[in-house]
């Protein structure tokens, strides 16, 4: 079991302007990520006990799981039924079920603990793959690389300076990290 992200201090630039426009914010950066996390908090609270159990089970800070749920599905608010991305991404953590993408088979209900376990296992796998691919990176850099890989696959992570270069919005690991900091400071 790996212990991941047990402290809120990881350098981040937060949400890009493109990501911040989801909420029509007039600003970007860490403050925008925190605002979006706060916006999702009411919906997120219904999943908190599941998130906490899954985090404990996998040694992943629950704040990081909540941050991915916030980014991927806005705590369920952005889903159409159980889906997004033209039925290629499923559930709260938006598992890639496209056979030409992640090719995952959805487990459990879209908001179930089984789904959160599956998504967290995928995240841990990516963090471990990035750690093996870049053993000279610090733990924080490996974590950020694994978060980016959760969005775009580990084959697209080539350097730390460009870790978010190919991610959605060009900011995935930065935004998720900033949202995780907010959730960590607000009960997760």
Image: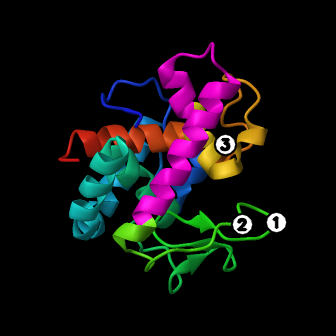
Provide the major secondary structure of the magenta segment. helix
Q: Which mark is residue 170?
A: 3
Q: CA distance from mark 3 to mark 1?
A: 22 Å
Q: Is residue 70 left or right of residue 81?
A: left
Picture colour scheme: rainbow
Residue 153: % across, % down: 71, 47
Kindly give the residue lying farthest to the left in the view shown.
187
Residue of label 2:
103
Residue of label 1:
100
Does dot 1 land on a helix, a strand or a loop? loop
Does the image show residue 14? yes
Residue extent of the magenta highlight: 116-144
- Crowding at mark 1 (Cα within 10 Å: few <14, some 14-19, many 20+): few
Residue 110 vs 75, above or below: the answer is below
Q: Quadrant of residue 52?
A: bottom left
Of callouts 3 and 1, the N-terminal one: 1
Q: Quadrant of residue 103?
A: bottom right
Residue 8 vs 153, above or below: the answer is above
Mark 2–mark 1 CB contact (< 8 Å): yes
């Amino acid at each position: 079991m790996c212990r991941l992200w047990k402290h809120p201090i990881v350098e981040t630039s937060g949400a890009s302007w493109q990501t911040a426009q989801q909420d029509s914010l007039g600003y970007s950066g860490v403050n925008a990520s925190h605002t979006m996390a706060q916006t999702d908090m009411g919906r997120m609270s219904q999943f908190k006990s599941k998130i906490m159990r899954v985090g404990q089970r996998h040694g992943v800070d629950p704040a990081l799981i909540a941050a991915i749920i916030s980014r991927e599905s806005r705590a369920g608010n952005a889903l159409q039924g159980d889906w997004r991305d033209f039925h290629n991404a499923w559930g709260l953590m938006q598992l890639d079920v496209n056979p030409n993408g992640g090719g995952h088979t959805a487990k459990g209900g879209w908001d179930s603990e089984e789904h959160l376990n599956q998504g967290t296992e995928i995240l841990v796998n990516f963090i471990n793959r990035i750690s093996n691919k870049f053993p000279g990176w610090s733990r924080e850099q490996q974590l950020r690389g694994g978060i980016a890989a959760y969005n775009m696959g580990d084959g697209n992570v080539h350097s730390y300076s460009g870790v978010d270069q190919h991610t959605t919005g060009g900011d995935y690991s930065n935004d998720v990290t900033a949202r995780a900091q907010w959730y960590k400071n607000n009960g997760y």
